[in-house]
Amino acid sequence: MRAPPSREPARHPEPEDDVRTLLELRRSANTVTSREQRHVAFWGGTVGQLGAVELVVPALEVIPVGDRETGGAAVTGESVPPSSFTGLAYGGRPRLARGRLQVAGQEAALSRGSWRTSREGRALRIRVVGREYRYQERGNRRHHALERAGARVEMTRSSASLASETLRGTAGGAVDSVDLSLAILLEGVYTRNLSLRGALISAPGRLLDRLGG
């Protein structure tokens, strides 16, 4: 009697296989109403079912009045929790140095391996709202990934500079509004030193900027 052909069990995609394009934010012109707003940049767009989202850099509302050393970035939206990052200013963006991150009104704990050589080792580790994240450079300075257990958001800038015209994001796994707010926010932070090469290249400029400030 001929045996029936064997059937392999159906393969259910792992979170990393379920990747979908989720967002595209475009840079918009700023209507200047004060001297401080001359260099403010905005990126906005609609993110899935969450509605309108906007990233602002520098976000003057999170920087203490008269503080010329601190830079800030902030994300707001219709259905995403507000988030903000402040740190030493460099090139119009906040740096990871002296960084403070808030998501949904909660302060985050930040850590990173400044003396490590690999991108994985130098990744920014974030603990906030009961979650643990890892944010790292992927491939080059225009590509970054924010990951936690079961979810990942990968972001791509059209340019590595603050003048980038578009920010695009793809999602994998059970991504929610907190993940998206945080991933978008970190695109407004100067993170060149998440790779050893980037840290070495940017070190002289960062040092001169501090001495000149």
Image (tube, rainbow, N blue to C red):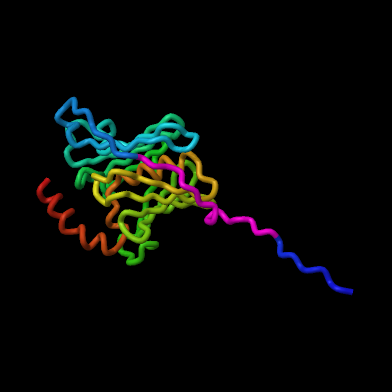
Residue at the extreme front of the image, as rendered: 2
Magenta region: which residues?
Answer: 10-25
Q: In this view, does 208 lie to the left or right of 47?
A: left
Q: Can residue 105 be seen in this view?
A: no
Magenta region includes residue 154 = no
Residue drawn at x 26%, y 44% as measured from the top left: 87
Q: Position of residue 7 (x, y in %)?
A: 74, 65
The quarter of the rendered structure image containing the C terminus is top left
How many numbered discs? Answer: 0
Q: Where is residue 209 in the image (x, y as percent from the top left)?
A: 14, 50
Residue at the extreme bottom of the image, as rendered: 1
Q: Can residue 9 be seen in this view?
A: yes
Q: Where is residue 46 in the image (x, y as percent from the top left)?
A: 42, 35
Q: Is residue 126 left or right of residue 163?
A: right
Choose top left, top right, bottom left or bottom right for residue 100: top left
Q: Which one is in front, 192 or 86?
A: 192
Residue at the extreme top of the image, as rendered: 33
Residue drawn at x 19%, y 58% as measured from the top left: 203
Magenta region includes residue 21 = yes
Residue drawn at x 39%, y 34% as measured from the top left: 53
Residue at the extreme right of the image, as rendered: 1
Choose top left, top right, bottom left or bottom right for residue 182: top left
Q: Which one is in front, 36 or 143?
A: 143
Q: In this view, does 91 lie to the left or right of 26?
A: left
Residue drawn at x 16%, y 55% as measured from the top left: 205
Q: Which one is in front, 151 or 165?
A: 165
The quarter of the rendered structure image containing the N terminus is bottom right
